[in-house]
Amino acid sequence: MSVFNDINHTTEKASQIGERYIRASHQYFKLKVFQQLTLSLSLVTKVLAVGSLLFAGLVFLSIAGAIELGNAVNSYSLGFLLVGLIYVTISVLIYLLRAKFNTYIIKKVGLKFFN
């Protein structure tokens, strides 16, 4: 009977080790999700804060540039039109290069997410 007792004891021990492993894995998974969520939330917060300030600065710079261009060509409307065309040109370039942006973002986020 001692063989059966040894097998029973070994099985119980293996079961306990398995349960501890599952609990530890669950805790690790929860911590990993928490880490990814906090990193994502802090990134979004920083992007919103910096982006809104940069946007406000860009608006003022655009208006000032349009006024100066208007003074240079003696037509304010032409100055604003030129600034608008510059933005359209930049937008078209970004649209054409969107695949490179996607690749860059996937590489950066992938490194953070899978580590």
Image (cartoon, rainbow, N blue to C red):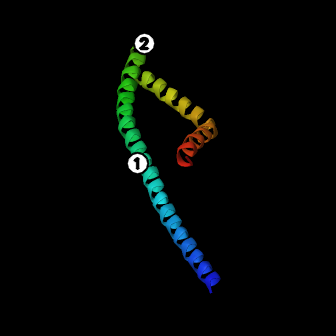
The quadrant in which residue 68 appears is top left
Q: Quadrant of the N terminus?
A: bottom right
Which three-letter amino acid code belongs to the residue tagged 2?
Answer: Ala
Q: Nearer the viewer, residue 1 or 34?
A: 1
Specify the label residue 21 is tagged with. none
How far apart are the two marked residues, 2 and 1, measured between alpha carbons? 45 Å
Residue tagged 1: 41
The quadrant in which residue 64 appears is top left
Q: Nearer the viewer, residue 14 or 45?
A: 14
Q: Residues within 10 Å of mark 1 (few under 14, many from 20)?
A: few
Q: Which residue is painted at 55% across and 46% down in the image?
A: 115
Q: Nearer the viewer, residue 69 or 27?
A: 27
Q: What SS does tag 2 mark?
A: helix
In the image, residue 60 lies at what x, y percent?
35, 26
Residues at discs 2 and 1 in contact (Cβ within 8 Å): no
Taking the view exactly as shown, the residue that stands out farthest to the top is 72
Residue tagged 2: 72
Task: Judge whether 102 appears above or below 26 on screen.
Answer: above
Q: Which residue is painted at 53% across and 64% down in the image?
A: 21
In the image, residue 80 lies at what x, y percent?
43, 25
Left-right relation of 65 to 29: left
Q: Which residue is painted at 54% across and 30% down in the image?
A: 90
In the image, residue 54 lies at what x, y percent?
38, 31
In the image, residue 16 lies at what x, y percent?
52, 72
Which three-letter amino acid code belongs to the residue tagged 1?
Answer: Leu
